[in-house]
Amino acid sequence: MSCLNFCQKCGSNQLLKINDTLTKCQSCHFEIYSNPKPTATTILIHEGKVLLGLRNKAPEKEKWGYGGGFLDWGENAYNCAIREVKEELSIDVLDLIYLTSLEHDYEYKGDLRSINSTVFVGQIDFNQVQSIIPADDVEEVKLVTLDELANHELAFEPFSTLVRERLFAYLGYLPKADLVFLRYQIDLTDNELLRLFGLRMNLVRHAVIYKSNHKLQELNQDRWQQVITDKLKKATKIGLNKEFVRSIWEMIHKETLRIESQIKSKLNK
Ligand SMILES: [Zn+2]
């Protein structure tokens, strides 16, 4: 954490460090929290190549890295990622996908800073690549293959390497993976699956309440068949076993119906 000498409220130097996060002012009793700062990181991909930017500002000046920056007030990580791409590359991106969230400490002007970054991945097309104008803290950009990225020196280590490993797992690019790495990635992915199941069922809860408030019809059998057909088509494309995917969606459907009837019985009380 950064070192504090004076209270930011009353200016007293009577500060008592309680722990790494909390410092209390003995004079005015103000509590000063040193939390990690939220940032967004964006990895842009064009035809299987990753876009890197050369930093023209400290920290990590003259090093290549992904895009991103600190969240502004009132901004969420996703909006921050989109704004930073616009500021650094002068292009608009849509449909960024959440990749991971990582914390990272680094030293800047003698202070140890801590950030927590939400990392997104986005695809850009030929026109977008052509429209890039490096600006802000980016001097120039280049596209590198995954092989090149695997051996590329990057700004903000070890954060950048952890992000790179997560990206490689996401893209299915695992030339040098060992068992420890693979287990770590499987573990992270399982946690993501749990998070997504939780998110999905929360959306179901909201949909049931919405439908009830607007007197709308329940999911009918035709719509359900459509959903299953669509999932099986997508599953085949990415090499998943059809029966595996069918049984997962049957379980999801069963749980959805259970949640629906549970909420409806509460709403009817
Ligand atoms: Zn004070």
Image (spheres, rainbow, N blue to C red):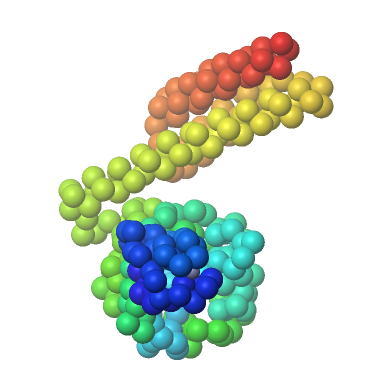
The residue lying toward the viewer, choosing from 52 and 174, is 52
Q: Looking at the image, which residue is at 52% across and 62% down?
A: 122
Residue 192 in the image: x percent, y percent?
Answer: 41, 43
The residue lying toward the viewer, choosing from 54 and 213, is 213
Report the side of 176 relative to 3 (left or right).
left
Q: Looking at the image, which residue is at 49% across and 77% down?
A: 11
Classify 236 as above or below 99.
above
Residue 116 in the image: x percent, y percent?
Answer: 42, 61
The residue lying toward the viewer, choosing from 266 and 41, is 266
Classify 194 as above or below 63.
above
Quadrant in the rendering for residue 111: bottom left
- Which residue lies most toward the right here? 215
Q: Looking at the image, which residue is at 50% across and 34% down?
A: 198
Report the side of 63 relative to 261 (left or right).
left
Res. 80 visible in picture: yes
- Which residue lies most toward the left here? 179
Res. 42 visible in picture: no
Q: How many discs appear?
A: 0
Residue 186 in the image: x percent, y percent?
Answer: 30, 43
Location of the C terminus (image quadrant): top right
Q: Looking at the image, which residue is at 56% across and 16% down?
A: 258
Residue 94 in the image: x percent, y percent?
Answer: 62, 61
The residue lying toward the viewer, choosing from 173 and 82, is 82
Quadrant in the rendering for residue 1: bottom left
